[in-house]
Image (cartoon, rainbow, N blue to C red):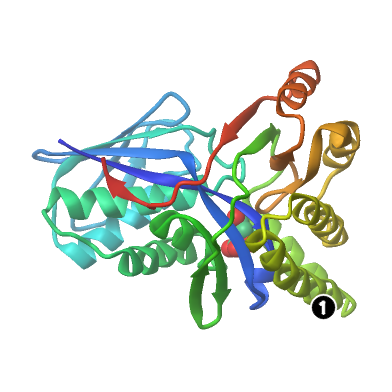
């Protein structure tokens, strides 16, 4: 039995604008997805209680889920891509996730990266991080239609990365800023639909281009603040990024109210990912009181730290 860990990804700066060629900064975290793989006579994917069992047919590439499962399309596309790239493998896979599906912690990216990594490792192939990132991005593109390489690259490579999407490149940011609290709000809509909504707004109103440019400029400034581990600056830029994302229509009243209430306990906070609920990343100033305030609001939360190594056999 082979076990693989693929980290979740917290978007610190630049989501949505990265779809239009702007840089972004994201961090791999110590919570994510574990995929176990064991060779067998047919391919079956089992998932934890948040998920559902999926059967995959070699040859036709068809996958059948028992029950409704938003990840079916990612799992099926990852298996097809793995078969194309590494050859045929009949095996049972078991996926266990730390986050509920579709909350904005790049669970789909971690699942795609995890399946590809486990499939190759089960066949004895040591797939390189760059290749893994590229294949997993292909999975997201196939399923979502539009996806930047950010989430899949950060889960595959690990650490805090500045991503340039077009052409893809990255650099590591060496920062002492670590230890984030993620608040998990109910999510309204899928990444695909939310990204499509922003695209439609951008097509309707040319002023939106200025918002996207402003996010790109903010990422440059944020990289400097992260590199100098300036918590006040990072927090303030998170707040500004959140208002700019609000101008794109992806930040709800619930997030604004929550951030206002949590202000005394954080340097800053913002949605992380496509938005409309989902994960809100908080940079804690008074960690214990922050956790207590979230608990009092009955908002589930989880603490994460930077994962420096990316997807790997464990
Ligand atoms: C989703 O996690 C982040 C977005 O920027 C979409 C993408 O980068 O593909 C909203």
Residue 217 appears anywhere in the view: yes
Disc 1 target residue: 209
Kindly indicate the quadrant of the structure image that contains residue 204.
bottom right
Q: Residue at x 14, y 41 (%)?
A: 42
Would you say 224 lies left or right of 313 here? right
- Report the image quarter containing ligand 1: bottom right
Q: Residue at x 80, y 43 (%)?
A: 267
Kindly indicate the quadrant of the structure image that contains residue 221.
bottom right
In this rendering, the answer to whether 54 lies above or below 57 is above
How many numbered markers are drawn? 1
In this rendering, the answer to whether 16 lies above or below 155 is below
Would you say 19 lies left or right of 210 here? left
The percent position of residue 314, horizontal first and vertical second, equals 26, 40
The percent position of residue 171, horizontal first and vertical second, equals 51, 71
The percent position of residue 139, horizontal first and vertical second, equals 41, 61
Kindly indicate the quadrant of the structure image that contains residue 212.
bottom right
Q: Residues within 10 Å of mark 1 (few under 14, many from 20)?
A: some
Q: Between 194 and 281, which is closer to the camera in this rendering?
A: 281
Q: Residue at x 85, y 38 (%)?
A: 259
Residue 73 appears anywhere in the view: no
Q: Between 102 and 110, which is closer to the camera in this rendering?
A: 110
Q: Residue furthest left?
A: 41
Q: Secondary structure at mark 1?
A: helix
Q: Between 250 and 31, which is closer to the camera in this rendering?
A: 31
The percent position of residue 230, horizontal first and vertical second, equals 73, 55
């Amino acid at each position: 039995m082979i076990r693989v860990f693929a980290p979740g990804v917290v978007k610190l700066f630049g989501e949505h604008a990265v779809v239009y060629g702007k840089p972004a900064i994201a961090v791999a975290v110590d919570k994510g997805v574990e995929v176990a793989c064991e060779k067998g006579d047919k391919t079956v994917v089992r998932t934890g209680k948040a998920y559902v069992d999926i059967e995959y047919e070699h040859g036709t590439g068809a996958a059948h889920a028992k029950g409704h499962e938003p990840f079916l399309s990612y799992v099926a596309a990852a298996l097809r891509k793995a078969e194309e790239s590494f050859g045929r493998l009949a095996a049972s896979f078991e996926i266990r996730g730390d986050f509920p599906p579709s909350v904005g912690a790049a669970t789909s990216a971690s699942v795609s990266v995890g399946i590809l990594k486990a499939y190759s490792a089960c066949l004895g192939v040591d797939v390189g991080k760059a290749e893994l990132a590229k294949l997993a991005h292909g999975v997201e593109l196939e399923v979502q239609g539009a996806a930047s390489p950010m989430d899949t690259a950060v889960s595959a490579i690990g650490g805090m990365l500045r991503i340039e999407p077009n052409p893809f490149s990255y650099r590591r940011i060496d920062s002492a800023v670590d230890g984030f609290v993620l608040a998990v709000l109910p999510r309204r809509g899928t990444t695909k639909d939310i990204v499509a909504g922003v695209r439609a707004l951008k097509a309707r109103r040319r002023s939106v281009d200025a918002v996207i440019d402003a996010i790109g400029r903010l990422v440059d400034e944020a990289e400097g603040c992260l590199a100098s581990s300036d918590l006040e600056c990072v927090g303030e830029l998170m707040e500004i990024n959140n208002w700019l994302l609000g101008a794109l229509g992806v930040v709800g009243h619930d997030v604004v109210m929550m951030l206002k209430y949590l202000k005394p306990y954080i340097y800053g906070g913002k949605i992380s990912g496509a938005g409309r609920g989902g994960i809100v990343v908080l940079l804690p100033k008074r960690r214990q009181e922050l956790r207590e305030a979230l608990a009092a609001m009955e908002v589930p939360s989880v603490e994460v730290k930077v994962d420096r190594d990316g997807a790997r056999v464990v």
